[in-house]
Amino acid sequence: MSEPPNGARPDNGTPLLEVRDLTVNHGQLRALDSISLQVFPGEVYAIIGANGAGKSTLLRTIAGLHRPAAGSVLLDGTDLTRQRPDRRARQGIVMVPEGRRLFGSLTVEENLKVGTTYTRKGPWTIERVYETFSWMRDRRSQRTAQLSGGEQQTVAIGRALVANPRVLLLDELSLGLAPVIVQRIYGMLPQILATGLTVLLVEQDVSQALRVASHIQCLLEGRTTLEGRPADVTAEQVEAAYFGLAGVVPAGPSAEGSESLWPG
């Protein structure tokens, strides 16, 4: 979307967000095992995988909600691994959590005001959110518990945007929503990216992730099984990586004669 031509990543660029050899345990369970990734400015970087793959754990660890057993999280070269979630938000890492986690007894506007608690200087204000999502202004005094699932998801995105993040973490935006609503929400991404944001999203809907992402990474049981540009992976590679089938072929432009999953 806002990447260099043909989705090429910058040769000499510095990643905005970097995860190095991240390992996270849930009790005796190893939820993430030496996961690394680099997200460059302006990218939509998608983490895909089945239930239990470790996708949400990865986002929550980046946001500071889980403490890693090993590894590090860096934002623009600064190590944030030991910082609390509120300090990470002030540095520019903000998450839209799975299930939205709005305050149902509060109004739309009150929920948006919650997002300004750790706001940074930037283009996003509550007024800007109302301009972007036009339906919201007229219903700003309505309790969010009375909204539809898609409307709640939009409010959750707006709440994150008013914090003016540098990296927006989106956890399972499509969960529990009708396909037409999912398409509408993902259709907002170009407008959001145009304000200078970078997006790291977790998505179980592989086809949706491939449509919007400039780079993908597949997790299986806490490990990376595939990584690359959507244009460089095949349906067979994604299926093998997603389900842990034998013979996963590394993604790359050398996969000749195979059908790309990237539209166009």
Image (tube, rainbow, N blue to C red):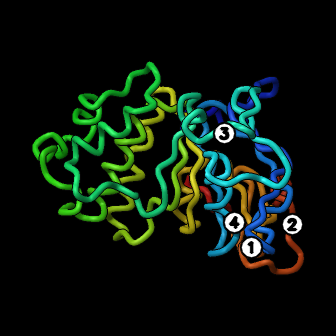
- Residue 225 is left or right of residue 160, and the answer is right
- In the picture, the disc for residue 249 is 2
Q: Is residue 189 above or below residue 248?
A: above
Q: Residue at x 34, y 40 (%)?
A: 114
Category of crowding for the residue at label 4, using alpha-carbon neighbours closer than 10 angstroms: few (below 14), some (14–19), many (at least 20): many
For the residues labelled 1 and 2, the Cα–Cα distance comes to 9 Å
Kindly state the secondary structure of the residue where label 2 is placed.
loop
If you read the primary sequence from the N terminus, does the residue marked by circle 1 or circle 2 appear first? 1
- Where 6 sits versus 31, above or below? above
Q: Amino acid at mark 2?
A: Val
Tell me the SS state at disc 1: helix
Counting residues from the N terminus, which is met first, the one under dot 3 or under dot 2?
3
Q: How far, Cα to Cα, is label 1 from label 4? A: 22 Å
Residue 184 x %, y %: 33, 55
Residue at 42% across, 41% down: 160
> Label 3 is placed on what type of residue?
Gly
Is residue 46 or residue 260 the one in the foreground?
Answer: 46
- Please tell me the numbered disc located at residue 236: 1
Instruction: Tell me if 194 is positioned left or right of 260 in this view.
Output: left
Mark 3 lies on residue: 7
- Disc 4: which residue: 54
The image position of residue 9, as x and y in percent, is 73, 35
Mark 1 or mark 3, earlier in chain: 3
Point out residue 115 in the picture as x, y percentages from the top left corner.
Answer: 38, 38
Characterize the local packing of mark 3: few (<14), some (14-19) or many (20 or more) Cα atoms within 10 angstroms. some
